[in-house]
Amino acid sequence: MSRSALAAASVLVLSLVGCSSVSLSPREVNVARADVHMAQAPSVAGVAQERFGKAAWGRQGDFSLDGQRVRYTRGAERLALFQPLPAEVRAPLRFTTGVADNDASCEGWTPEQTANGRFADSRPWVLSCRWGSAPAAMLQIGEGPLRAGVLTREGAYRRGELTVGLRSVHLLEGQAKPQGAAVGYEMLYQGTVVGSLDLSGAVPRLRRPDPATPVGRAVTEAALALALASEAGGR
């Protein structure tokens, strides 16, 4: 091969490498990720969504949700309900919004592996949180049923006589195949989905009732706990 032909081939290779690196840049990945959304139930499809927080929470930090400051500390740099709970972590999460009875402290533990857990090659851990004292609110979520070969997470938030159900969502809009890890969570009141937490994008996206109502407050508090026990945009 002549020197001129060799030089031309080298330029072509370098150009292709340059194009490849651009297509894989973090900015391009984030742009693509922004177009991905969790599949929404019809009951909340028309509800406006609010973005909050950040993709990598780290051990501590703060953020704003609709003008309300949330401060948090976590027991590990990375924490997710669909990843193993670090062996040394017993108190995975604490957070506060600065409102009376709104300080949350959470515990975590890994129960014995179930038949579903062995089938799905998973060791789900339990997240249990408590808010305030009058009356105390409690949240607990852990292993749910096996659906389409995917081991889900289910639980509930309770404050007094109010109960809001929690369940993981594994479908993205326009896709029929479920994801192994959750792409978000739904909050249910009296059997109807009233709120959702979308974790498929670069940051969490929340749909909720009026946060001034008891159901809206429950959805908000549950969503904060679930978001902080997840790593948005990490799939």
Image (cartoon, rainbow, N blue to C red):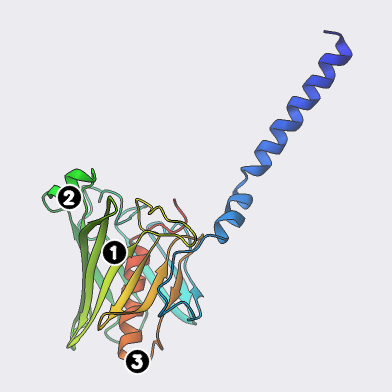
| Mark 3 closeness class: few <14, some 14–19, many ≥20 residues within 10 Å | few
The residue that label 3 is drawn on is 213
Mark toward the start of the polypeptide (1 vs 3): 1
Q: Is residue 223 above or below residue 35?
A: below
In the rendered structure, which amino acid carries the disc numbered 3? Thr
Please state which of the two labelled residues, at mark 1 or mark 2, is closer to the viewer. Answer: 2
Outermost bottom residue: 213
> What residue is shown at x 38% (from left), y 91% (from top)?
212
Q: Which residue is mark 2?
A: 116
Q: Hey, which quadrant is residue 24 in on the image?
A: top right
- Residue 5, image x, y percentages: 85, 15
**Residue 75 horizontal side relative to residue 58, left or right:** left
| Quadrant of the image occupied by residue 159 | bottom left
* Furthest residue toward top: 1
Q: Nearer the viewer, residue 154 or 17?
A: 154
Numbered mark located on residue 223 in the image: none
The residues tagged by marks 2 and 3 sit, at their Cα atoms, a distance apart of 37 Å
Q: Amino acid at mark 1?
A: Leu
46 sits left or right of 208 in the view: right
Percent from the top left, x then y, of residue 63? 46, 71
Tag 1's secondary structure? Answer: strand
| Towards the viewer: 211 or 53 | 211
Q: Secondary structure at mark 2?
A: helix
Q: Earlier in the sequence, mark 2 or mark 3?
A: 2
Q: Left or right: where does residue 233 sit relative to residue 144?
A: right
User: Could you tell whether 86 is left or right of 16 in the image?
Assistant: left
For the N terminus, the quadrant is top right
Nearer-N-terminus badge (1/2): 1
Q: Which residue is mark 1?
A: 93
The residue at the far right in this view is: 4
The secondary element bearing badge 3 is classed as loop
